[in-house]
Amino acid sequence: MKKITIAEDDQFLSNAYRVKLTKEGYEVRMTADGEELIASLNKEIPDLIILDLLMPKKDGFEALKDIKANDKWKNIPVIIASNLGQTNDIDQGMKMGANDYIVKSDLSLEDLVKKINALIK
């Protein structure tokens, strides 16, 4: 079973992701901030990470930098899911090594599943 780790501090949204992805056959692990995400990667390496940018303790950009700097984690596909929809935020996320960038306000869970399937099937 493919594993997805979600780093998202919005409980409602992370729950919606979890329910949808579990129904799609994924094993889902939830983290609420960048520090928790990095701690979880030390325990288990997922097949994909969904990463929010605006989170407490350690934001998504910092977490992404840590992921891409670590030889064990640098090849994990990362989809940034953020409300930061400005071109410079998207460009920065992609330059830092994200595989995809979705703006949460424009997101349907079906589209998210398609993007995930394209990256890890």
Image (cartoon, grey):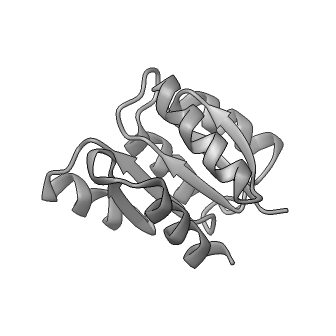
Q: Nearer the viewer, residue 76 or 13?
A: 13
Q: Position of residue 108 (x, y in %)?
A: 40, 55
Q: Is residue 42 left or right of residue 74?
A: right
Quadrant of the rendered image containing residue 29: top right
Is the residue 33 above or below the residue 25 in the image? above
Is the residue 40 above or below the residue 72 in the image? above
Residue under the point 66% across and 35% down: 30
Question: Where does the C terminus fall, quadrant-wise?
Answer: bottom right
Residue 9 visible, this angle? no
Is the residue 12 above or below the residue 81 in the image? above
Q: Is residue 70 left or right of residue 41?
A: left
Q: Nearer the viewer, residue 64 or 11?
A: 11
Q: Position of residue 103 (x, y in %)?
A: 29, 52
Residue under the point 52% across and 60% down: 78
- Count every numbered label the image shows and give the total: 0
Question: Where does the N terminus fall, quadrant-wise?
Answer: bottom right
Q: Is residue 21 left or right of residue 34?
A: right
Q: Position of residue 37 (x, y in %)?
A: 62, 37
Q: Position of residue 68 (x, y in %)?
A: 53, 59
Q: Nearer the viewer, residue 62 or 10?
A: 10
Residue under the point 67% across and 63% down: 71
Quadrant of the rendered image containing residue 90: bottom left
Residue under the point 76% across and 42% down: 42
Q: Nearer the viewer, residue 118 or 84?
A: 118
Residue 96 visible, this angle? yes
